[in-house]
Amino acid sequence: MAGKTIRMSTIKQLLQLHQQGLSNRRIAKHLGLYKATVNNYIQKLKANNFSIEELLQLEDPVLETKFSAGSPAYLEDKFEQFKTLIPYLEKELQRKYVTRKLLWQEYKKQYAQGYSYSQFCFHLSQLLVARKGSALMQHDPGNKLQVDFAGDTLSYIDRDTGESISVQVFAAALPYSSYTYALAVPSQKTDDFLHALQCCLNHLGGVPQLVVPDNLKAAVIKADRYEPTLNRVMEDVANHYGFVILPARPRKPRDKPTAENAVKLIYQRVYAKLRNQVFFSLYDLNTALAQGVKEHNQTRMQQCDFSREETFLAQEKQFLKPLPEAGFALKYYADLTVMPNNCIYLARDKHYYSVPFQYIGNRVHLVYTRTLVQIYREGSCIATHQRSTAAGYTTSIEHFGSTHQHHMRRSPAYYIGKAHEKSAALALLVERIFELEKIPELAFRNCDALLSLQRKTDPVVFEKACIIARDNDLMSYKRLQAIIAQCALLEDPNQMTIPFPKHGNIRGKDYYQ
């Protein structure tokens, strides 16, 4: 019976009229059917000895099988033969250079009475689709967040250069409510991906149990069907927020269908509306993008009386875990060797950071964030610095030996303070030295020499010598050394008399009386 399929309710009418004794011609006229069609059904009824009463009690799909056995093509022997070849054909199609045409030619050599090329391709496609059917996914509220980057980019114009800057669009969706989030970021690098993910979690106001990303390098270092290797920074983010990472399998977009569908809808409902707008900053672009996604979330879904946003707020948000009190600080790691200058070199910033001198030559572990650098040795933190992205040095004086510490601390105030610890007169002398010296650094060696001289000299003699040197502006080390030598010969440094030698030619006071 070629042509349009007749409803089984009409066939039941046909059977009742036949039971009442009407001719086939009258039945055809009454039901608006061709007489040949009525004849065909009556012939099948008689040939199979069907009971009209039993047929009238059957449901329509069951009744249809009584009169139509389906396509005979699937009952042929060659179809049964063809089904056994499916695993082989599927495997061969995955091999390089192999086409369906080649497989069909090989099939015809083996089965000369087999299918034509068109029927070969049709049955092959039908069976492969049937074997790879998709499952119906059931989602719990607050359980998963599926994330992805849109394939198509957006752009804005740099006001200074007039250059068009292309940006990536991060998209995320909760499968239970289909609530969607999108954010434009400069790239798909780890920093930008994690920034977008954190902004998404803050926007949702909670944390799901699972995050399902694609196999992008920002999240997965090595893709694998069963055990992908995760980016360490991604693991840090997951541990901080308290979710588990479940990457989609390679080349399996159906593992995150909600995110894939969200991207498609963003194209249609957001990108399309922005096509004639020009933006001059990433902030302006994201403002428009957020407004478009908000309208999408507030639009009533097909065959539903509610929107994605209403479902999210009413049924899903309460199941999200609370956000941590502190935001996540992106961490980086490095293993470096302490150099002879007491420092490790962070090549990323072209910057040196000091380490206690006891660890020179040792291997240390570096953990650094955007603002902080921490250096570990055998599980203990041995140094902490504020991070600097400019080339140069960040040091702590305590990390160096005593000789280096003295050299690094040198300044007029340092020397005056050291002099006060030794002698008040020396402090006055050092102050006078820096008053007269226009370039303080030129006086540092002289001050070192004076401090060294103080350690070798009698305190009383040194004190008096410093007073004389200061009063007469005799500031050099050699001048003070000479004054000290002279003062040591004098019983009273204020009297400059020299005793006469004793010999027979001296007449004495008695001679003049």
Image (spheres, rainbow, N blue to C red):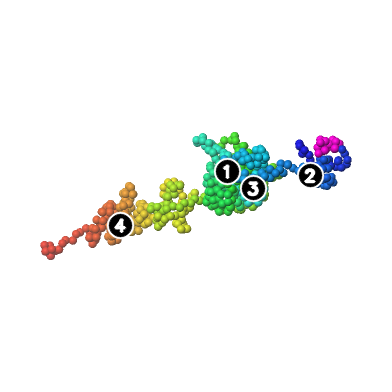
| Secondary structure, magenta segment, majority class | helix
Name which of mark 1 and mark 3 comes first in the sequence.
1
Mark 3 and mark 2 residues within 8 Å of each other at the beta carbon = no
Q: CA distance from mark 3 to mark 2?
A: 43 Å
Name the one closer to the observer, 272 or 387. 272
Q: Which mark is residue 95?
A: 1
Residue sitting at 81 percent across and 39 percent down?
Answer: 40
Q: Which residues are magenta?
A: 24-40
Mark 3 vs mark 2, foreground winner is 2
Disc 3 marks which amino acid?
Answer: Pro
Q: CA distance from mark 1 to mark 3?
A: 36 Å
Which image quarter: residue 7? top right
Dot 3: element: loop
Quarter holding the N terminus?
top right
Disc 2 marks which amino acid?
Answer: Lys
Q: Position of residue 386 (x, y in %)?
A: 46, 51
Mark 4 vs mark 1, foreground winner is 1
